[in-house]
Amino acid sequence: MFPLKDAEMGAFTFFASALPHDVCGSNGLPLTPNSIKILGRFQILKTITHPRLCQYVDISRGKHERLVVVAEHCERSLEDLLRERKPVRYPSYLAPEVIAQGIFKTTDHMPSKKPLPSGPKSDVWSLGIILFELCVGRKLFQSLDISERLKFLLTLDCVDDTLIVLAEEHGCLDIIKELPETVIDLLKKCLTFHPSKRPTPDELMKDKVFSEVSPLYTPFTKPASLFSSSLRCADLTLPEDISQLCKDINNDYLAERSIEEVYYLWCLAGGDLEKELVNKEIIRSKPPICTLPNFLFEDGESFGQGRDRSSLLDDTTVTLSLCQLRNRLKDVGGEAFYPLLEDDQSNLPHSNSNNELSAAATLPLIIREKDTEYQLNRIILFDRLLKAYPYKKNQIWKEARVDIPPLMRGLTWAALLGVEGAIHAKYDAIDKDTPIPTDRQIEVDIPRCHQYDELLSSPEGHAKFRRVLKAWVVSHPDLVYWQGLDSLCAPFLYLNFNNEALAYACMSAFIPKYLYNFFLKDNSHVIQEYLTVFSQMIAFHDPELSNHLNEIGFIPDLYAIPWFLTMFTHVFPLHKIFHLWDTLLLGNSSFPFCIGVAILQQLRDRLLANGFNECILLFSDLPEIDIERCVRESINLFCWTPKSATYRQHAQPPKPSSDSSGVRSSAPYFSAECPDPPKTDLSRESIPLNDLKSEVSPRISAEDLIDLCELTVTGHFKTPTKKTKSSKPKLLVVDIRNSEDFIRGHIAGSINIPFSAAFTAEGELTQGPYTAMLQNFKGKVIVIVGHVAKHTTEFAAHLVKMKYPRICILDGGINKIKPTGLLTIPSPQI
């Protein structure tokens, strides 16, 4: 959108016609209110941008089918110029074919052919009437009422020269005759009665009048979109006089922001559309007692109340005052509107309100999203970063870890998912019209998908749903449509309602990353492996809860499939999904496991206190989940989980690393640089699904163990040394081999608890020299190492039964470590 500049924002309101309450559609569901239909169709108007057109900004739905439209508004109109003789009320400007079409009402329960809508040629007629009024300096049809005006326009079919008849009717023939021939010729072309003979706007632009005028105006070229193959900087030009540009800004930095941003901030600063319209008496309320009928029949028919005048159309536009917003932002300095995109901004000047912003950054997310000044700074920063995408991709990741401003969420998600290239050309090339077998299931699912949302429940929303889902199915012939894919599509479509190509591109990038092969025709092996790993994650982080759920038979297969198949979009409403996915997109493919565990931990007390039947009932209507707490705890769980503990052989294969040194990345877990690691000799090996199901605790790779123990090899020596980094031990290694094998070589810092004598007959841990140390490490990661897989699995299961959290098994056992030269031999006792 263009900057606000000298324009203002205006609002006007109208009512959509109400539908009968006792009629259902062909699908048996209540009819979609006309206000929702209008709301869906209105969205495309927001995409029409041109420097000489007022920009539509928003539409909101109120009570009783009321709609309020917000648009760019200029106080001085063409009508004002006409009054000064230097027009515009609609019935007089309607083209004859539009009038002849009459009022057409459609209903969902009565199939009927939709009439042709008024199109570009109808606008050419309206342009002719406006030009006529400007030329003669008066408004047409002022002496006639509306019905007579419409009748007169229809009779123009019988005349030879519409222009002359109109001039004679209004006593301005002399003025018309004095006009230049080029202008008269233009008016005649515009006022051609039959649309088939009337020129289109493109044809009209070739008229001699426009060829003389067009060189005076710089042709408008719509800027290339963020995700396109076009060079975005191709048409950038610097003003000739930079000093004049600085004077033009005149410290009104807010006016340089887009009207969409200004309206968003206006709402945050306390702007209320309905209140503004009430103050100007555009919306009038009546006491309910005054709406009662004077006479009522038994069948419900009433008499004695005239039509409420407040429901009639009032085309008055109310200017929305920006005083409150400007006052809220009065302390924001100019540098905040033009931030430098440097990695270190510590030396940059700060505004007077910088301390307040720093304090706001520590507040809960829901408060930050309502803070006008904070959102202004975040919107401007993300706007600059996104315009520099993909070159500033790392900084986008860095800032997204703080939070993502809601206004910029759609584009930011696309950047986090790595969407690039000519997405529109790719989307347009997909056949979305040819019928396919999946069409029927899609038609059934869409009316049930997040239909509490007005935008997604509109017919326009359904049509967009249908096209995006069908495009995905057609473009992925190796995959199939599963129920739940519609829910997965919903967040992307909502955020990119006017950009189906971007919604499709985001969805196509999201699924391979987080749901690789979930949509195979036979996905049972993928789902079963995923749920098994999830069970191990529950045992790893909350052994007490895991023990209880396993004892009552409440396994993840009964409740978690919809969670992961839809990435929780089937579980939570959209506003919660936005906050959840803001964080999900920053993690790798294992992060959903942590979200699932975090949800269970919020329900922990109720789950521990109930049996199987009560748990089933609990999950049939999931209680309210604190999503901010869920996000916070998911991050903590993610950081505590070794990278290889969530290994899945059916996950997306890791991309080859550009680093040929073979050194494993030491990037933090929760960052843009934390992809699934590439496979090496020390990575985890795949095991049969049945073997995986038999293990309560997850396995970790030798690579992870070396990293967590902070071991390294120096030169050609076989003696392992600790890295110089000083920190508390991250984990305890428990070697369960017999003492003789342990002495021959073991991992530095490990303790030896032989499996054969580790537990009593009652299942308790045998007291020994290292029992106290094991107890002291309770709560930290404990890795069980041995050379017999069955023994390590049983030892780990015993500790889980004893409610030891964060228990895992070294994949491949001690034999995986031997080739690394990291085993140490204790010094002989003298």
Image (cartoon, helix red, strand yellow):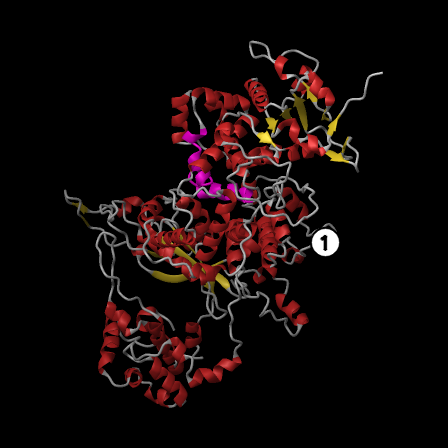
Where are the magenta residues, as a range?
556-585
Residue in the foreground of this view, choosing between 779 and 139 = 779
Task: Report which quarter residue 783 is drawn in.
Answer: top right
Task: Report the magenta stretch's main SS.
Answer: helix
Picture quadrant where residue 633 is located? top right
Q: Position of residue 202 (x, y in %)?
A: 40, 77
Residue at 32% over, 48% down: 443
| Residue 617 lies in the magenta stretch | no
- Quarter containing the C terminus: top right
Kindly tell me whether residue 138 is visible in this rendering: no
Q: Nearer the viewer, residue 32 or 577?
A: 577
Tell me which residue sits at (45%, 82%) in the image: 210
**Mark 1 residue type:** Pro
Vertical placement of residue 166 versus 346, above or below: below
What residue is shown with label 1? Answer: 349
Left or right of 110: which side holds 644? right
